Image (cartoon, rainbow, N blue to C red):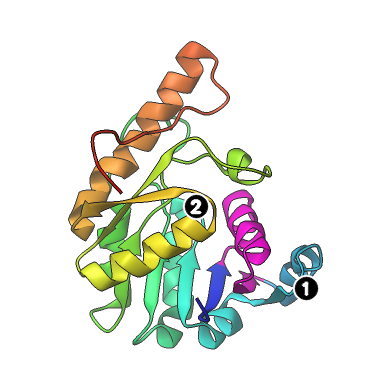
């Protein structure tokens, strides 16, 4: 894959973990942050990765990956929307609402991914992924136990997203239409609840019964 990938919110736990894995896989990565200085500081530890503010990163990229908290999703997308037309946006947002993050609280649109599509408009192709994989696991070297469900209304966009999932060292599974993202977003709260009950370091999903 020769596309330029911007990780918006790339200085956070999930964003920096994904950027690091894609950097090691030889992909072209830009870390985006609210300030260019912070992005540059994090990018220094990753070979070949550059750092820009979110708007600059989105403008320079072919594929944009949003890795910000739910509370920042709308504001961040509004700030980069002008640079997204004709591009693929991969939304990783999980609608966690503190303090009850172990309780499913989906937004009025039905899912954070559908909300993202409504914010950016039809000129942007939106997929969603990486909801149920712990950032702490991604930050470690080696394979990650757990599959990634990928949602999107166009098959070709899901295929591209799954290529990025696999480049990060995980197995991607087609989950169907973007609206189905609600299932994985809700499952994140369920997994948090499971982690608390069983003292897990990070439970995950594994899809069985399919050949791939």
**Residue 143 seen in the figure:** yes
Q: Percent x, y for residue 42?
A: 76, 63
Q: Quadrant of residue 90?
A: bottom left
Q: Which residue is mark 2?
A: 69
Is residue 108 visible in the rendered image? The answer is no
Residue behind mark 1? 37
> Residue 46's image quarter?
bottom right
In the rendered image, residue 160, in percent from the top left (x then y), is placed at 37, 69
Q: Which residues are magenta?
A: 8-34
Q: Is residue 68 magenta?
A: no
Of 66 and 148, which appears nearest the observer?
Answer: 148
Crowding at label 1, few (<14), some or many (≥20) Cα neighbours within 10 Å? few
| Residue drawn at (52%, 87%) of the image | 59
Q: Nearer the viewer, residue 27 or 132?
A: 27
Q: Residue at x 49, y 18 (%)?
A: 196
Q: How would you rate the neighbour count of disc 2 (Cα within 10 Å): few for under 14, some for 14-19, many for 20 or more?
A: some
Q: Is residue 46 left or right of residue 165?
A: right
Residue that appears at 20% across and 50% down: 180
């Amino acid at each position: 894959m020769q596309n330029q990938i911007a990780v918006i919110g790339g200085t956070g736990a999930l964003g920096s973990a994904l950027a690091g894995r894609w950097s090691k896989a030889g992909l072209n990565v830009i870390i985006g942050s609210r300030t260019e200085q912070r992005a540059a500081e994090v990018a220094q530890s990753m070979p070949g990765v550059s750092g820009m503010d979110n708007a600059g990163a989105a403008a320079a990229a072919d594929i944009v990956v949003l890795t910000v908290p739910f509370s920042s999703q709308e504001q961040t997308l509004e700030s980069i929307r002008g640079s997204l037309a004709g591009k693929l946006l991969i939304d990783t947002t999980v609608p966690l609402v503190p303090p009850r993050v172990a309780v499913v609280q989906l937004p009025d649109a039905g899912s954070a991914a559908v909300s993202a599509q409504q914010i950016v408009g039809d000129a942007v192709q939106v997929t969603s992924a990486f909801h149920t994989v712990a950032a702490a696991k991604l930050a470690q070297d080696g394979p990650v136990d757990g599959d990634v469900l990928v949602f999107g209304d166009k098959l070709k966009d899901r295929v591209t997203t799954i290529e990025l999932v696999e480049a990060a060292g995980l197995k991607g599974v087609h989950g169907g239409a973007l609206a189905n993202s609600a299932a994985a977003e809700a499952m994140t709260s369920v997994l948090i609840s499971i982690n608390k009950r069983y003292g897990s370091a990070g439970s995950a999903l594994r899809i069985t019964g399919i050949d791939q």
